[in-house]
Every structure is written in C-alpha cells, then in structure tokens.
Image: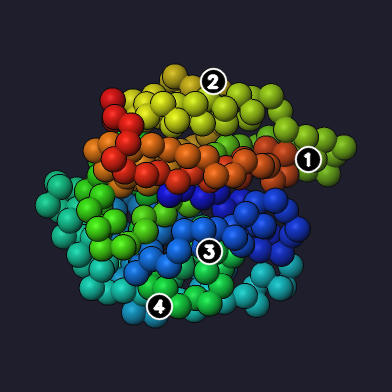
Amino acid sequence: MFVSHGAPTLALEDRPARHFLNSLGATLGRPRAIVAVTAHWETEEVQVASAAQPDTIHDFFGFPKALFDMRYGAPGDTALARDIVARLEAAGIAARCDDTRGFDHGTWIPLACMYPAADIPIVQMSVCPKQHPLFHFRLGRALASLRHDNVLVMGSGSVTHNLADFRAQRGTAAAEHTPPYCDEFCEWLAARLAAGDSDAVIGYRDGAPHGARAHPSPEHFLPLHVALGAAGVSWSGERLHHSYMYGVVAMDSYLFRSGHAAVH
C-alpha cells in the first residue's frame, strides 16, 4: 500500500488523515513484518536498514518538543533485510544493507498511528531519486512475492508535495486553501490507478495534469511506484483516503490488491 505521511505534526494534530491512519491498522490486520519505503531516505543505490533495534530519527527541526520526545520502538528484522537485498540483486538491482539506519519520520509517523504498540518488525528501505519511476516499479516487482509471507510493502510519501507552494501560503489567509492543480492531479491519479494503468502512473511527469508542479522533486512520489510494483503482475488500486494538510499536501492513501486489473 501507499500512505501519505504529511508533516511530522500529523502525529499531534486533529486532522482527517490522522484519524484515517489511526483506524488503518485494524482494517489491514496484523502483517508478519512491514517493509517501509520512505521518501526521507534518499540514496544513490538502494539501501535496506538491517539493524535489529533501529533508533527513532527526528529528521526535522522547528516543531513542538512533544514530537522530539516521541519514540517508535518497533524491532527491525535483519534476516528479512538480507532477504530483500538478495531478491533485489537477483533482479539485477544493486542494493546493500545498512545496520546503522534508524526510522525516519516517513516511517515512524504513519506507523505510530497505524500500529501504536510498535511490536511488528519493520525494515526500512530507501528511494533513489536519480532513478526513473520505472526503476522503482521494478524494485517493487522484485518484492512482490513477499505478500505470500504476510509481509506488507508500504510506500510512504505524499500524493502532492510542493513545498514552495506551501511556504507561499503559510501565514496567509490561504494557508489551508487547495489550489485547483492539486485536485486535478489527485483525481487523475485515482482514475489511472482504478483503471490499472501503470504506464500512465510511471510516466506521470509528462502525462499527468501538473505532474511537475505536484512533484517538483520525485522522492515523495517514488514510494508509490514501489508499492504499485509490489502488487504483482495484475492488480487493482483502491483509494482509501483523500484529504489535504496545509492546503497543498495531498494525504491520499491507496491499497493495491493483486490478481485483478491487468498491468499495461
């Protein structure tokens, strides 16, 4: 699946996306482990966190102290991390383990809402923004069989993520105003995923309405491509949630089910 994690303050604020994530764990049930592909770990080649007990990383500044006091103490899964690297290498994708990396907020913010007991093993994985979305789709495809082991592959980013637009609106009367381009991009994505059109989603930068404005840089959208690839050879995409944070950060979440619509 793919979740939008928003700003770190999602963990503190009364917002629709937080209420949705608070109920999502019960909706999904309990996986054996979770592979969290996070927008906030950018690398040249794929890296997979292999620490047995990852730290909580507070990779932000200027937020309330309550956020810095939060910890998400879920265990890692070293064996699963090594298995993921082996699967990627077998698919011709260079990857390596990192036994020092902790959970950044792209991982622990949504998972603290979804699974607050922090008792499910989590393996965090990076994105490679210099690589094409097709690379990330194929990365996910290499992990597709993990679902047979009750492992959830979760991409964590945002459906729209233009921080320049956010900063321009912050502190103004339009602070929670949603520009039309955000709605147009979100609805385009929902339609393409419902239609099983992976080609369009992979080529969003050129084919989607306002693709470049919705994502001036790709790192917050690439986790969706990994989750999409992990759904397997045939899939259907269901939008479970749609809302905005600060007007311009779309908080949509999608569940991909295998064995339904044909991949183009």
x, y (%) of residue 203?
38, 25
Q: Which mark is residue 75?
A: 4
Q: Is 250 placed left or right of 49 in the picture?
A: right
Instruction: Give the amino acid at mark 1.
Output: Glu
Disc 1 crowd, CA 10 A, few/some/many (<14, 14-19, 20+) = some
Residue 193, image x, y percentages: 44, 31
Q: Secondary structure at mark 3?
A: helix
In the rendered image, the residue lying farthest to the left is 90
Q: Residue at x 12, y 52 (%)?
A: 90
C-alpha gap between disc 3 and disc 2: 34 Å
Reply above or below: 195 against 18: above
Q: Residue at x 40, y 78 (%)?
A: 75
Of the image marks 1 and 4, the number of the one nearer the N terminus: 4
Residue at the spot of label 1: 176
| Mark toward the start of the polypeptide (2 vs 4) | 4
Looking at the rendered structure, the secondary structure element under dot 1 is loop
Q: Position of residue 107 (x, y in %)?
A: 49, 61
- Camera sees residue 61: no
Write down the residue under mark 2.
Answer: 209
- The amino acid on which the numbered mark 4 sits, given as a three-letter code, is Pro
- The residue that label 3 is drawn on is 26
Q: Are marks 1 and 3 in contact (CB under 8 Å)?
A: no
Q: Are marks 2 and 4 in contact (CB under 8 Å)?
A: no
